[in-house]
Amino acid sequence: MYLTLGLIAIYIMGFFTAIPIGATQIEIAKRALAGHVKAALMVVLGSTISDVMYGFIAFFGIAPFLKEKIVMAGFWLVGSIILFVLGGHTLKNYKKTIQVKGESKALKHNGLSLVVGFSLAATNPMMIFWWLTVADIEARIGLIEKFTTNTHLLFLLFGGLGIGSYLVTLSFVLRWANKFLSDTTERKINLSLGIILIVIGFYFLFRFLQVYFFGGSRFI
């Protein structure tokens, strides 16, 4: 009974964890608004796989590797490059993407979308601490008495389903909302998404410089 409640709780926490707007949500929005629901779902799949991967890292003992300064700096640098490329592509093609529905090869390519989703989520090793924190909370309040290998796997499954569920819902809601948006409004949305990606890219670059050159906090 308590295990069932614990799995429901991690599902709900995963769902709400995915709500804050970030680079992954922006890439999903770009594809969903352009009518590429399958590509948006591939971003969801890639992102969820990456998040669950960090859960495996958290629960099965190789998290200390990610405490190395050079490794953390690498995450921030790679993340900034990915975001700059995605942001630049969005700003360059935001009019074309809207005017020619479904014609952007980069947006509708399912394999590339999977890689984009995975890559963006992979630059967020903070997910390790999220998995460890929610597991600790559930253990402390007695929802999960003892973590075994099977319990960890169920925990990862339901947490991943929670994260993925919100992102899937977002994809279909934006695709539905697209029917009521004018071309001008869609252009403005895409332009805004491109700018946000660039801004987040600069933040990632700042964190790289802070960690690598100045020895700043590595995870916060």
Image (cartoon, rainbow, N blue to C red):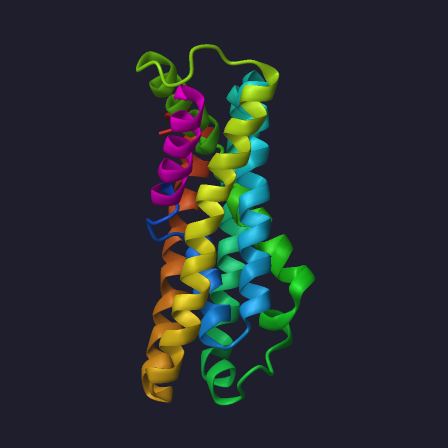
Q: Is residue 139 above or below residue 52?
A: above
Residue 218 shows up from this direction: no
Residue 46 shows up from this direction: yes
Q: Is residue 18 above or below residue 2?
A: below
**Closest to the observer, 60 or 189:** 60
Range drawn in magenta:
1-16
Q: Percent x, y for residue 65?
A: 59, 20
Q: Is residue 68 above or below residue 111?
A: above
**Closest to the observer, 44 or 92:** 44
Task: Identify which residue is drawn at 43% across, 25% down.
Answer: 129
Query: Is 58 one of the magenta-colored residues?
Result: no
Task: Identify which residue is drawn at 40% across, 69% down.
Answer: 174
Q: Percent x, y for residue 36?
A: 55, 73
| Left or right of 82, for residue 139 | left
Q: Percent x, y for residue 167?
A: 45, 54
Task: Identify which residue is drawn at 37% across, 25% down.
Answer: 217
Q: Main secondary structure of the magenta part?
A: helix
| Left or right of 47, for residue 182 | left
**Closest to the observer, 79 or 61:** 61
Residue 209 sits in quarter: top left
| Left or right of 57, for residue 84 | left
Specify the quadrant that holds the C terminus.
top left
Query: Is 14 one of the magenta-colored residues?
Result: yes
Farthest residue toward the right?
111
Specify the quadrant that holds the N terminus.
top left
